[in-house]
Image (cartoon, rainbow, N blue to C red):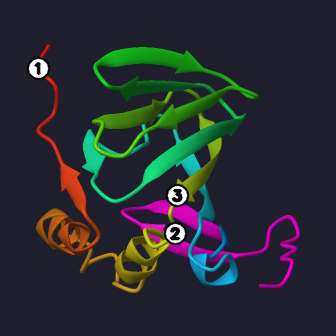
């Protein structure tokens, strides 16, 4: 392996259901140990409740405020806060401000390829059933929305 330097604003951007996901460090650069992505979210943006069966995620809030749901608990997070979602634990988040930015470390690497695969589809092709099917290839399980 070689050291990796990714300047601000660099990295492959994948549009995933209207959310720009920037791959900052790809798993191929870390020998598969981990990857790092950024999610640029709009108000009320974020993934629905889901489970990663293959990897854990660590979220660092860089901009904005978020509501995270992880393991049945709600947590409010702001810039500088860090949250860890272990593999196998249901989680999701929602941006509460007009703009939010998360840095997400994924351990082990591999899930960044989901973003690449979905991002390679046109916006018209990114229908929810197709995204769910692609997610299954990567050990991603979408859960029904929580009831009030």
The mark closer to the camera, 1 or 2, is 2
Residues drawn in magenta: 1-23
Residue under pointer 1:
147
Tell me how far mark 1 sits from mark 3, CA to CA: 30 Å
Give how far across and how far down residue 132 sits, in percent.
Answer: 18, 64
Q: Residue at x 61, y 84 (%)?
A: 28
Q: Is residue 52 above or below residue 147?
A: below
Q: Residues within 10 Å of mark 1 (few under 14, many from 20)?
A: few
Q: Residue at x 62, y 67 (%)?
A: 22
Give how far across and how far down residue 117 sits, in percent.
Answer: 37, 82
| Label 1 with label 3: CB-CB less than 8 Å | no
Would you identify the image quadrant in which residue 98 lies? top right
- Tell me the SS state at disc 2: loop
**If you read the primary sequence from the N terminus, does the residue marked by circle 1 or circle 3 appear first?**
3
Q: Which numbered disc covers residue 107?
A: 3
Q: Is residue 100 above or below residue 53?
A: above
Give how far across and how far down residue 29 sits, in percent.
Answer: 69, 81
With 109 as the anchor, is 132 left or right in this view?
left
Q: Closest to the observer: 40 or 3?
A: 3
Q: Is residue 52 above or below residue 139?
A: above
Q: Is residue 65 above or below residue 91?
A: above
Residue 52 is a magenta residue = no
Q: Closest to the observer: 55 or 6?
A: 55
With 48 as the anchor, is 77 left or right in this view?
right
Q: Which numbered disc covers residue 109?
A: 2
Q: Residue at x 11, y 20 (%)?
A: 147
- Tell me the SS state at disc 3: strand
Tell me how far mark 1 sits from mark 2, CA to CA: 32 Å
With 122 as the anchor, is 100 left or right in this view?
right
């Amino acid at each position: 392996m070689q050291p990796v330097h990714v300047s601000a604003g660099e990295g492959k951007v994948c549009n995933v259901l209207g959310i720009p996901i920037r791959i900052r460090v790809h798993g191929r650069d870390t020998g598969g140990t981990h990857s790092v992505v950024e999610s640029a979210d709009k108000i009320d943006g974020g993934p629905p409740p889901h489970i990663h069966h293959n990897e854990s995620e660590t979220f660092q809030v860089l901009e904005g405020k978020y509501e995270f749901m992880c393991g049945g608990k709600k947590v409010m997070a702001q810039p500088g806060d860090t949250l860890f979602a272990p593999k196998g634990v249901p989680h999701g988040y929602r941006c509460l401000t007009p703009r939010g930015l998360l840095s997400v470390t994924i351990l082990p690497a591999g899930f960044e390829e989901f973003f690449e695969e979905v991002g390679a589809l046109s916006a018209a092709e990114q229908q929810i059933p197709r995204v769910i099917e692609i997610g299954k290839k990567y050990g991603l399980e979408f859960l029904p929305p929580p009831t009030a």
